[in-house]
């Protein structure tokens, strides 16, 4: 019988993917939430629950077709509260959930926390997460401190960041030097399931975040390049006066409201050391710019334009849309994924690319030209073969070689002078 | 924890070769193999390579793979790993086996069947001279050679000058047909009646030329670099499928072995990790390590708790070179032929007593032309145009030196996660450079006389390990007994390249399998 886990918060940005991942792994799942989860073919049952309600007794009890519960992943979070921090629904509700889980003998509880978890965090969210972290006292109760989650549907904070990065060319922003530790939503799910199922864990707190932080400003610039196909300039703003201004602004009787909580969260974001944590559970993260390849349409349009030029430089003629698609998919999957900053003249007259192909140095431009060569191994764009299968005769072959030698000799001076590695 | 007579770790050629005699002797054999499935065979009705390059329907799907894995940048690796294997094939090997390397390219896979999924099928046997420094003789290996050759299916000639080098006392399938460039070279060589210090003949290939029940005969469609659709090229995953049909053989997939320990009762406890991170233990009276030289070495050194003591890693340093037969310029490109090595040669190194290099010649038309173009300092358009002219007469030589020119080593290091890692440092002897230069010069001179000219600037010397000919970390008679049992760890036997005493320039897969068969037979006899 397959492993059985409980998931709370499956309606949220992370939880939805987590539930799908668990089912795809063949686990059986008890889902606790307000609304029924999407129907699954097998191994899923649902109990109505939220952080303000007691846990249904049957939810954590043994049931036919389900093995004993191995772990509980607690991803539910209530974002709004009228209560004080000590009485916050998240803290109280999690306490009740923990009690019920302990009574049922569940040996592993994984709490979805945040890298901002600190008792002295600037924002309430970080302090609430820290308060819940203190409730995890028994063996097998683990806190997963999750970094800046990106990827998937543009919801919540992720959707806001993508929109923000493309709003203007010059973005005034606070905290742009703050280090953020991005992690893809699928990697978070993978990490949570590993934490839930690992037979033994050596620590109580695990960081699920990129071990090497990048600045928030750099992160916004990356998103702009990928999703909006252009460069973004970010203007640093001092935090304190901005907070005062935001506070005053929010007092005005306007519909627009600026979320102070998010600004505070960003400003007070600590960096967690998590390389060892990830290594222990065998989770390898992929660089965000590689993961985001399928999430930017402008980027893809620019890649198509680049592909047209690169394929023409290698093969001459006009590549078909299907070949262009193969080029784009190849760059997305096995290249840097972003369009190269090629000169506009090279996009218009692709033959010029032959004059800037570096002689020896490797680089993205060379590897994309090589990729185009591999694609055209299957034939030229006009349907002819790249090779003379029927034989072209010795004289013609020798004349062809002499012509190439002449052209390449002439090109050499340009390539040595103007050869470029090509950067995204 | 389950008990077995014998537990074999690894389903590559040596693992299955060791498992066969044990299974046939009626022992309960449990074979643990990698976490990845074998490479899928291409469609058996895949058009020939020339048809694909002339726009046959679905050509890019066949040439690049469904997921376009053929577009990966695999510079420095064998071209087969780009054209034939998917991206996942090499993934996780280093981390999973806790192997780190400096100046040494580690190539390995956790796929069922190991590297036999992508091998070049070169199937020479070692001769008495090759085994000079081994504690066993050719007579000890010959019965196993015969059995393995028969099971694998090897084609070639017993009647040309290279036949004694490849091995004579075995039963072969008829040779494959030769494409025009190779046929021309061989014809000229035969007309000269041989050349001093240089032998040329057909290559010996683990390829069927007659169909069997589960494998077809070679279609000679030139597309071998993209995988074999009919299974003519031997893959130990095919053998595994037959092995597991025996009632006393079980196969466990997806367990990454972390460590071996000996129990008080004399049995061996093997701990592995599943894909979900769960640890699992197996127990057996006898464990055969056949996980590939480096993975087996790490497990063996860890069992012996032999930290920070370097052991040698023998490898056969190699280089590649392009050759052109000017007479073939402008001629039609062959549409039919075997797509990997068609000819083999042996070249004596004068002044290097008894040392020789071993080379294979590939027809350029069967190679992935863009990989050849990648070596040219021309623009991509220029390289493509040059290849168009050269392809009919292009040959690629892959040349190997014996392991006496290698100076690589491996050490077991402690690590914070409790799983020690194997650190490999690559190196070559001080004589290596001169030997390569001499080999290039003499090869060029001999082949020129046969009408093939070395292309200037085409020689590319491989990083140690990139040739994937390595072994010799725990040699027989030194670190293991002559039957592969690890000294200091009764019950644990090594059966792969790790126990080789030397590596000649020749390909070692058939010897690795024969030696594993010999060890398996010995253990079966002992158990009886």
Image (tube, grey):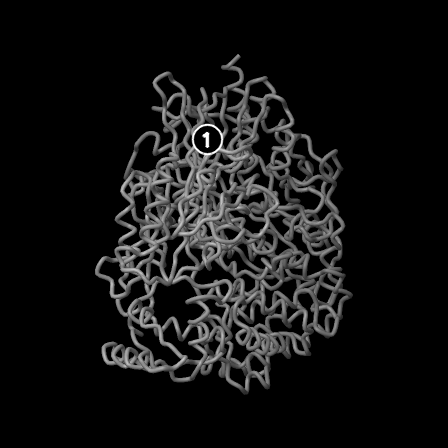
Res. B432 visible in picture: no
Q: Position of residue A424 (x, y in %)?
A: 46, 74
Q: Name the outermost residue toward the top.
A: B528
The relative height of residue A258 versus residue B40 in the rendered view (above or below) is below
Q: Looking at this view, is B176 or A269 the one in front?
A: A269
B514 sits to left or right of B389: left
Q: Quadrant of residue B488?
A: top left
Q: Secondary structure at mark 1?
A: strand
Q: Residue at x 26, y 62 (%)?
A: A270
Q: Chain of mark 1?
A: B
Q: Name the outermost residue toward the left.
A: A120
Q: Residue at x 64, y 79 (%)?
A: A403
Q: Looking at this view, is B77 or B476 the one in front?
A: B77
A296 sits to left or right of B227: left
Q: Position of residue A374 (x, y in %)?
A: 61, 65
Residue beneath disc 1: B289
Q: Position of residue B20 (x, y in %)?
A: 59, 25
The relative height of residue B508 versus residue B265 in the rendered view (above or below) is below
The relative height of residue A409 versus residue A63 in the rendered view (above or below) is below
Q: Name the outermost residue toward the right.
A: A390
């Amino acid at each position: 019988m397959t492993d059985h886990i409980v998931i709370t918060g499956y309606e949220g940005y992370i939880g939805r993917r987590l539930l799908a991942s668990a089912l795809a792994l063949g686990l059986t799942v008890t889902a606790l939430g307000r609304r029924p989860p999407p129907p699954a073919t097998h191994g899923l049952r649902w109990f109505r629950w939220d952080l303000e309600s007691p846990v249904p007794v049957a939810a954590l009890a043994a049931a036919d077709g389900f093995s004993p519960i191995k772990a509980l992943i607690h991803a539910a979070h209530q974002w709004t509260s009228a209560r004080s921090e000590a009485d916050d629904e998240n803290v109280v509700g999690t306490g009740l959930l923990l009690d019920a889980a302990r009574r049922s003998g569940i040996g592993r509880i994984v709490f979805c926390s945040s890298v901002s978890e600190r008792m002295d965090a600037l924002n309430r969210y970080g302090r609430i997460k820290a308060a819940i972290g203190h409730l995890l006292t028994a063996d097998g109760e683990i806190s997963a401190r999750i970094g800046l989650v990106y990827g998937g549907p543009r919801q919540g904070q992720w959707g806001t960041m993508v929109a923000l990065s493309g709003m203007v060319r010059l973005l005034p922003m606070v905290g742009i030097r703050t280090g953020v530790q991005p992690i893809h939503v699928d990697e978070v799910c993978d990490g949570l399931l590993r934490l839930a199922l690992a037979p033994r864990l050596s620590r109580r707190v695990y960081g699920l975040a990129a071990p090497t932080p990048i600045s928030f400003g750099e992160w916004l610039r990356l998103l702009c390049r990928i999703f909006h196909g252009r460069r973004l300039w970010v203007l640093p703003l001092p935090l304190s006066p901005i907070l005062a201004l935001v506070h005053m602004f929010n007092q005005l009787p306007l519909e627009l409201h600026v979320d102070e909580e998010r600004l505070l969260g960003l400003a007070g974001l600590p960096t967690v050391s998590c390389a060892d944590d990830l290594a222990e559970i065998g989770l390898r993260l992929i660089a965000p710019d590689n993961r985001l390849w399928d999430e930017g349409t402008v980027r893809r349009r620019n890649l198509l334009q680049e592909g047209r030029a690169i394929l023409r430089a290698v093969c001459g003629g006009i590549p078909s849309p299907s070949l262009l698609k193969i080029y784009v998919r190849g760059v997305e999957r096995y290249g840097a994924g972003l369009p190269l900053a090629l000169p506009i003249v090279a996009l218009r007259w692709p033959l010029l690319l032959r004059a800037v192909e570096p002689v020896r140095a490797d680089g993205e431009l060379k590897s994309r030209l090589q990729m185009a060569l591999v694609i055209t191994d299957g034939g030229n764009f006009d349907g002819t073969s790249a090779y003379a299968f029927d034989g072209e005769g010795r004289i013609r072959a020798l004349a062809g070689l002499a012509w190439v030698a002449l052209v390449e000799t002439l090109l050499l001076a340009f390539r040595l002078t103007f050869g470029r590695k090509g950067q995204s | 924890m389950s008990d077995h007579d014998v537990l074999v770790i690894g389903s590559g050629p040596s693992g299955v070769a060791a498992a066969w005699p044990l299974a046939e002797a009626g022992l309960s054999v449990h074979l643990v193999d990698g976490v990845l499935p074998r490479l899928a065979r291409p469609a058996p009705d895949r058009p020939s390579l020339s048809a694909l390059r002339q726009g046959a329907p679905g050509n890019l799907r066949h040439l690049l793979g469904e997921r376009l894995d053929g577009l990966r940048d695999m510079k420095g690796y064998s071209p087969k790993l780009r054209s034939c294997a998917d991206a996942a094939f090499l993934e996780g090997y280093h981390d999973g086996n806790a192997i780190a390397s400096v100046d040494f390219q580690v190539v390995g896979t956790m796929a069922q069947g190991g590297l036999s999924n992508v091998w070049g099928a070169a199937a020479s046997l070692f001769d008495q001279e090759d085994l000079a420094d081994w504690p066993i003789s050719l007579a000890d290996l010959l019965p196993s050679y015969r059995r393995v050759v028969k099971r694998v299916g090897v084609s070639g000639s017993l009647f040309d000058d290279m036949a004694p080098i490849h091995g004579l006392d075995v039963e072969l399938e008829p040779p494959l047909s030769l494409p025009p460039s190779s046929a021309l070279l061989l014809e000229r060589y035969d007309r000269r009646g041989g050349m001093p210090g240089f032998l040329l003949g057909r290559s010996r290939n683990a390829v069927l030329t007659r169909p069997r029940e589960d494998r077809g005969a070679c279609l000679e469609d030139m597309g071998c670099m993209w995988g074999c659709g009919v299974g003519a090229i031997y893959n130990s995953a095919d053998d595994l499928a037959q092995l597991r049909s025996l009632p006393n053989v079980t196969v466990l997939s997806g367990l990454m072995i972390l460590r071996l320990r000996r129990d008080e009762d004399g049995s061996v406890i093997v701990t592995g990790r599943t894909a979900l991170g769960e640890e699992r233990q197996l127990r057996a009276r006898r464990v055969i390590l056949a996980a590939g030289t480096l993975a087996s070495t790490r497990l063996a050194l860890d069992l012996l708790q032999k930290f920070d003591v370097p052991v040698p890693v023998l490898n056969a340093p190699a280089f590649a070179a392009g050759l052109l037969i000017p007479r073939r310029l402008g001629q039609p490109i062959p549409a039919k032929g075997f797509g990997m090595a068609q000819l083999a040669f042996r070249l004596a190194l004068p002044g290097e007593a008894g040392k020789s290099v071993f080379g294979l010649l590939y027809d350029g038309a069967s190679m992935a032309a863009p990989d050849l173009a990648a070596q040219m300092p021309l623009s991509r358009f220029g390289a493509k145009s040059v290849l168009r002219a050269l392809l009919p007469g292009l040959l690629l030589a892959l040349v190997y030196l014996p392991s006496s020119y290698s100076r690589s080593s491996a050490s077991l290091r402690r690590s914070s996660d409790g799983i020690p890692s194997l650190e490999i440092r690559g190196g070559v002897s001080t004589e290596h450079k001169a030997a390569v230069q001499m080999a290039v010069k003499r090869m060029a001179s001999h082949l020129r006389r046969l009408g093939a000219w070395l292309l200037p600037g085409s020689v590319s010397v491989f990083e140690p390990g990139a040739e994937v000919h390595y072994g010799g970390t725990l040699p027989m008679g030194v670190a293991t007994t002559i039957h592969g049992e690890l000294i200091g760890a009764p019950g644990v036997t090594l059966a792969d390249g790790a126990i080789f005493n030397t590596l000649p320039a020749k390909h070692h897969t058939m010897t690795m399998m024969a030696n594993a068969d010999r060890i398996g037979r010995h253990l079966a006899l002992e158990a009886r």
